[in-house]
């Protein structure tokens, strides 16, 4: 047997596994973000000694400029996750010191030829092999369902559907996909439907060496799709994380509806919702409503309907769409209070429509406690913190969002907005330029950098950029308002 050495630190009831990058307390995993884990590791490695703020910033964020406020919030969140303020001592104006007694050990793993635990995963849309093009929704829909399930495991960061959707029609090398999405494993495969029977072929691939970590074929009736998803989710997580605790097993086995037809309609709804166009959003909402008619207690369908209304369309005013979104999200939470996305959506509605600031923050906090890897939740919470003047915390939240989804245009643009609204114009412009490097045609970044250039009195550049945004995205009240503001500020 080829035993591998595991590097461990133990303090109190905690065990920090450096090899597998997992923190446990009394054998149960403690949810930490990647930056929080790296911060804890650096402090533990230097236990009893002061680690300066400069050292922490340089080590934890080697390729980014972040303020000391972001570091402070990171340490605050780490203390909260540890449920122990006394483990990390603040040294005023200098840094931090880990004060618990630490025992460093090396242990042998009895698992033969197995890689260390994998913490980042991309689930690609399944290739639809059926001749019937109307079944294309199944490939993305089942991938979306698996992403939702696997995201419940806090030790596992799963790239969201919005990031992987582009691979529905793209042929990509698995290793290239993994590099692009910055993940350690990729789940890919195909689906074929013939009548009421489906065949799903899946493989879990490690891009490091092209090894197939797991592969299986499923031949089932469509009404057994829940059983198939149960088996896939459990087997994939066991391969990645090696073992699941009882709470994680229960999370994976939860079923949202007993109706296979309602579930089919829900998958179609998510397929169109993920396209994010006006027509697709309306079509997705219609499918969610049909699913609800078949199963009024289908919480995910209510959440999908709320998401459709929340994004809004040009044909519906906020006064019309937001009350519908709020009613749907409240119904979803009445049926299942553990839906992280629904809590975040409710927080956004309370903030942006109800102006209920006191009620909004607990919803965001609840959403992120349920799923710390929900990047959009971190983004919306950052917007809230920015609005109430807690700028350092807002920077930390949006940094976490971008860490979870580093190639999201929306999140990278939102990071620029946080800098912009806190009057850090140089940093904002740099962040918007970074976003435009990823996609020069992203209209939101074009219009926002134009606004920043105006604040910097770079009027010619501002005018050129907003005109480009109008050419590529068309006229709308936002870009026309920015154009008017630039013309007025420049005296034209």
Image (cartoon, grey):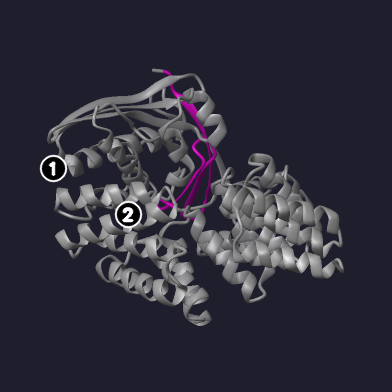
* Residue segment shown in magenta: 2-29
- Measure the alpha-carbon separation of dots 2 and 1: 24 Å
Say which mark, if any, is on residue 283: 2
For disc 1, the marked residue is 223
The answer to whether residue 264 is above or below residue 179 is below
77 up-or-down from 488: above or below: above
Left or right side of 126 for 131: left
Q: Is residue 265 left or right of residue 324?
A: left
Q: Name the front one of labels 2 and 1.
A: 2
Q: Quadrant of the N terminus?
A: top left
Q: Position of residue 461 (x, y in %)?
A: 82, 53
The structure residue drawn at horizontal position 24% and vertical position 27%, both measured from the top left corner, is 131
Q: Is residue 39 left or right of residue 160?
A: right
Q: Is residue 471 visible?
A: yes
Of residues 33 and 257, which is closer to you in this image? 257
> Which type of secondary structure does the marked residue at label 2 adopt?
helix
Residue drawn at (38%, 61%), measured in percent from left and top? 308
SS under mark 1: helix
Q: Main secondary structure of the magenta part?
A: strand
**At x 37% / y 70%, what residue is drawn?**
325
Does the segment drawn in magenta span residue 376? no
> Residue 482: image x %, image y %?
71, 65
Q: Position of residue 385 (x, y in %)?
A: 61, 70
Query: Which of the two discs, 2 and 1, labels the residue nearer the N terminus?
Result: 1
Residue appearing at x 71%, y 67% in the figure = 421
Q: Mark number for residue 174?
A: none
Instruction: Judge whether residue 13 is colored magenta.
Output: yes
Image quarter for residue 424?
A: bottom right
Q: Position of residue 250 (x, y in %)?
A: 26, 52
């Amino acid at each position: 047997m080829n035993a591998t050495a595991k590097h461990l630190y133990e303090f109190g009831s905690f065990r920090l596994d450096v090899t597998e990058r997992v923190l446990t307390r009394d054998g149960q995993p403690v949810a930490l973000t990647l930056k929080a884990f790296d911060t804890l590791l650096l402090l533990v490695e230097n236990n009893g000694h002061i680690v300066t703020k400069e050292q922490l910033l340089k080590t934890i964020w080697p390729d980014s400029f972040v303020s000391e406020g972001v570091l402070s919030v990171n340490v605050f969140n780490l203390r909260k996750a540890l449920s122990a303020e006394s483990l990390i001592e603040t040294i005023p104006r200098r840094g931090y010191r880990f004060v618990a007694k630490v025992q460093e050990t090396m242990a042998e793993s009895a698992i033969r030829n197995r890689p260390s635990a994998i913490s980042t995963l991309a689930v690609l849309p399944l290739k639809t092999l059926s001749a019937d093009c109307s079944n294309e929704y199944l490939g993305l829909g089942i991938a979306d369902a698996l992403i939702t399930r696997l995201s419940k495991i806090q030790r596992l960061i799963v790239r969201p559907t919005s990031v992987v959707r582009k691979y529905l029609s793209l042929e990509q090398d698995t290793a290239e996909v993994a590099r692009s999405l910055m993940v350690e494993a990729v789940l890919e495969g195909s689906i074929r439907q013939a009548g009421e029977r489906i065949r799903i072929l899946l493989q879990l691939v490690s891009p490091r060496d092209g090894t197939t970590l797991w592969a299986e074929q499923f031949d089932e009736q469509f009404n057994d799709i829940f059983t198939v998803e149960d088996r896939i989710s459990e087997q994939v997580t066991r391969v990645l994380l090696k073992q699941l605790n009882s709470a994680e097993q229960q999370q994976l086995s939860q079923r949202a509806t007993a109706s296979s037809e309602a579930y089919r309609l829900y998958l179609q709804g998510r397929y169109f919702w993920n396209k994010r166009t006006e027509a697709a959003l309306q079509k997705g909402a219609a499918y969610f409503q049909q699913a609800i008619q078949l199963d009024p207690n289908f919480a995910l369908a209510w959440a999908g309907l709320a998401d459709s209304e929340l994004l809004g369309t040009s044909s519906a005013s906020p006064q019309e769409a937001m009350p519908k979104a709020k009613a749907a999200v409240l119904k979803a939470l009445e049926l299942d209070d553990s839906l992280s996305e629904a809590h975040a959506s409710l927080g956004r509605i309370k903030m942006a429509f109800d102006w209920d600031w006191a009620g909004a923050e607990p919803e965001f906090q609840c959403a992120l406690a349920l799923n710390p890897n929900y990047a959009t939740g971190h983004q919306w919470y950052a917007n809230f913190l920015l609005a109430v003047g807690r700028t350092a915390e807002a920077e930390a939240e949006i940094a976490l969002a971008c860490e979870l989804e580093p190639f999201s245009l929306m999140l990278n643009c939102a990071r620029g907005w946080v800098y912009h609204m806190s009057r850090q114009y140089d940093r904002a412009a740099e962040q918007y330029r970074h976003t435009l490097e990823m996609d020069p045609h992203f209209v939101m970044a074009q219009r926002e950098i134009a606004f920043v250039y105006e604040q910097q009195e770079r009027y010619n550049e501002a005018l050129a950029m907003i005109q480009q945004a109008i050419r590529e995205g068309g006229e709308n009240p936002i870009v026309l308002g920015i154009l008017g503001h630039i013309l007025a500020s420049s005296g034209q």
